[in-house]
Amino acid sequence: MHLRRSAAPTSVRPSTWTDPYGRLAVRCLQTVVIVAVIGGIVTAATTLGLVTIPVLLALIVASALYPLVAWLRGHGVPSLLATTIAFVGVLAAAAGVLWLLVAAFAGQWPALQASAVDGLQQVQDVLHELPVRVTDGQIEDAVSGLVDFVTSARFGAGAIAGISAVTNVVTGAVLTAVILFFFLKDGPAIWEFLLRPFTGAQYERARRIGDRVVTTLGGYVRGTAAVAAFDAVAIGTGLAVLGVPLTIPLAVVAFVTSFIPMIGAPIAGTLAALVTLVALGPVKAVIVVAIVVLVNQIEGNFLQPVLMGRTLRLHGLVILVGLTAGTVLGGVTGALLAVPLIAAGWGVVRVWNGEDEPATPWRQKRRETVPVG
């Protein structure tokens, strides 16, 4: 009986791409390619901001309104009529807010202007009492310098740029409204059309990602809107009790800035305190600051955990970095869009391989522990 001799193991010839340094080089090259692709996408999005921003805004608003449209369709309302009801409701709400702002400014601006004059006089009196003497001539020079700037050609160029910016805003608003209507009417059909190249497991993953993005964006907007409404009502009530002018516009500012986590509340509180300081003096300005702090404590400790739930599962550092990047790339609009888009991206990672199966690199290998003491 002859036993077949086992073949000698073949040695694998070492390669510069398979040793530790080679694998590190491959990972670095992959990272560079990924960063370059992301940079190209961001550059294209910011360059075409007049298109990408309306699309993103429409997607976020449509995600928040889609449950209402689906509920109306489920109760026998025709698709076009259900879309029209939701669409007209959004436009009516936006028009109502703008009307409140214009009416409040028109009615209370003269009183605020008179209060501002008194406040500037108080500031001037304080400057006269400082150890460093500020003369009337220096103040007049500063005022005349401001007047010269306003009447200069540079200010005129800035005004023309401002008119161009207003035109872009109007164009973007109209485009957002049109895109929003079609997203509400044909959103699922548009997504199915985009998924036509995918089949099998890839199709299921794409459907899962789409559902999670809509759920995350919709939950974020609805929860934030409820918290913002509480902030606006509470702060507006406090300002009205104190007799602060421009109460309604300041309440609207509190509502809008509540959509910017972490920095929105300080912005609204600072503006309200400044208006109160000019109109009513420092004591009531301090009271306004206390009201804003109290409202935000109630919001952060009670309302957000209940209303937002598990929608926004992001670390504070991630939110801060995202806000900074969004502000640098898109200004105020970028700050508004940054956090919901980051939340949607994290939601995609968490359902990449299944409903409760995150992408492999993000699976929890061990429980994080926090050192005590």
Image: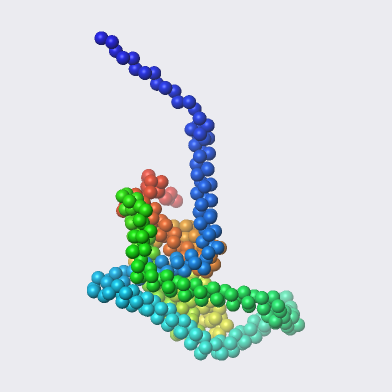
Residue 213 percent coordinates (x, y): 38, 60
In the image, farthest residue toward the right: 137
Residue closest to the eye, 152 or 191: 191
Query: Where is residue 132, by image quadrant?
Result: bottom right
Q: Quadrant of the N terminus?
A: top left
Q: Please say whether residue 262 is visible from this viewpoint.
A: no
In the image, farthest residue toward the top: 1
Left or right: residue 132 compared with residue 238: right
Query: Where is residue 55, by image quadrant?
Result: bottom left
Disc tally is 0
Color encoding of the figure: rainbow
Left or right: residue 125 compared with residue 308: right
Residue 155 percent coordinates (x, y): 67, 77
Residue closest to the eye, 108 or 18: 18
Residue 346 percent coordinates (x, y): 41, 56
Q: Is residue 309 above or below residue 146?
A: above
User: At 63% from the left edge and 77% from the top edge, which residue is drawn?
Assistant: 160
Residue 229 percent coordinates (x, y): 40, 75
User: At 45% from the left edge and 84% from the top edge, which residue is drawn?
Assistant: 100
User: At 46% from the left edge and 84% from the top edge, which residue is drawn?
Assistant: 99
Residue closest to the eye, 69 or 329: 69
Left or right: residue 167 compared with residue 188: right
Residue closest to the eye, 199 or 268: 199
Q: Is residue 177 above or below residue 370?
A: below
Q: Please say whether residue 147 is visible from this viewpoint.
A: yes
User: At 34% from the left edge and 77% from the top edge, which residue is drawn?
Assistant: 84
Query: Where is residue 220, by image quadrant?
Result: bottom left
